[in-house]
Amino acid sequence: MAQENAYKPRKRTVLKLVSNHMDAWQVASVIATLPLLIHGGIRGETAVLVLAIGVGYWFAFALNDYFDAPFDALDRQKAERNFFVHVSVCGWVVVLLSISLLVVVAAAYSQFGPPGWLFWGISCFIAWAYSAPPLRLKIRPGLDLITHVLFVQTFPYIVCMRLIQARWGLLDGVLLAILFLTSLTAQLEQQARDFVVDLQGGGTFTTWMGRDRVVHGLRWATAVCLFIALISVLNGTIPWYLLPFGLIGLPALLHRFWRQPDAPRSERLVLLSTTAGFLYAGLIFCYFLLS
């Protein structure tokens, strides 16, 4: 009975490792499907690519948790979400598992020849450079923001556009601008939430600029993002089948305007939004793949 009771917390901890940052890898997967839907690039090899991108983003955020564990342990809520705060994992085990997973992901990218290998290499480097010492870009004010803006939400779109050799159009530019702003504001929102912990962990753009200023800028950037999306919908640039993605994410964006600057975002609302978008993208993707 005692062994069974001890097993349950362990099982819950492992489940957190698998499900943690669901919003991040779900969003990356959804973004990767967009150029495929728009440019008719849905086929078997791109389905594998989207899966690999989702797995790759899960790995990147898990790696970030590994290197953040000593700092997350200082905050009760962050410690609860971080698998590596509760479970000590040897460095060689992390290296072995990382290599194994990245080899599997490489197989998906290798289908596209040298460009695929190039994007795989860039992905691996950024995942390491952002979280791991000695670079640890996430604690270098300015570079932390630039890295997030370029490689969290815009990168999956660019990767798929390039690998399916699609021609860029107005819609792609509009979506990339929206993704740029959503990635920027998501990072600022997270840094505002983690302000106190980040002060002890080395600092970020927000600890350098000040939380009040960042929250003010975050709201302005969110308003610009919503304005671009609204104009693009009204003039017909954004097609009808993409509207549910915007409507699904709208409550989480609007929530930024009425909550207090020091109040955290609603994690449940964000997760519900990203999961709904993920399921919707999956349904459309499977429909075109099987039709």
Image: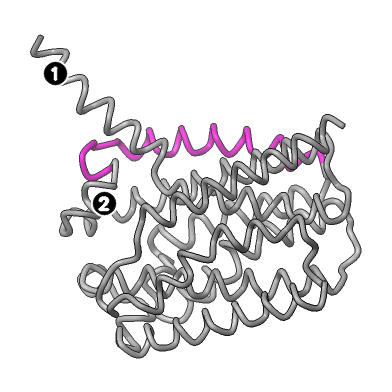
Residue 49, relative to residue 209: is it above or below? above
Q: Closest to the observer: 251 or 162?
A: 251
* Horizontal and vertical percent position of residue 224: 59, 84
Q: What element carries label 1?
A: helix
Query: Where residue 17 appears, x then y in whole percent?
Result: 36, 38
Residue at which label 2 appears: 69
Q: Give the range drawn in magenta.
A: 84-111
Give coordinates of residue 49: x percent, y percent: 72, 41
At x 83%, y 38%, the residue is 288
Which numbered disc flags the more N-terminal residue, 2 or 1?
1
Q: What residue type is labelled 1?
A: Asn
Of labels 2 and 1, the one closer to you: 1
What residue is shown at x 52% (from left), y 83% (from top)? Answer: 221
Residue 177: quarter of image? bottom right
Give the distance between the C-alpha atoms of the residues marked 2 and 1, in whole angstroms: 25 Å
**Nearer to us in this view, 85 or 268:** 268
Q: Is mark 2 on a helix, strand or loop?
A: helix
The disc at residue 5 is: 1
On whether residue 99 falls in the magenta region, the answer is yes
Classed neighbour count for the residue bearing mark 1: other residues with Cα under 10 Å, few (<14), some (14–19), many (≥20): few
Q: For the point 60% across and 69% down, which residue is it?
A: 150
Q: Where is residue 233 in the image (x, y as percent from the top left)?
A: 74, 72
The answer to whether 115 appears left or right of 219 in the picture is right
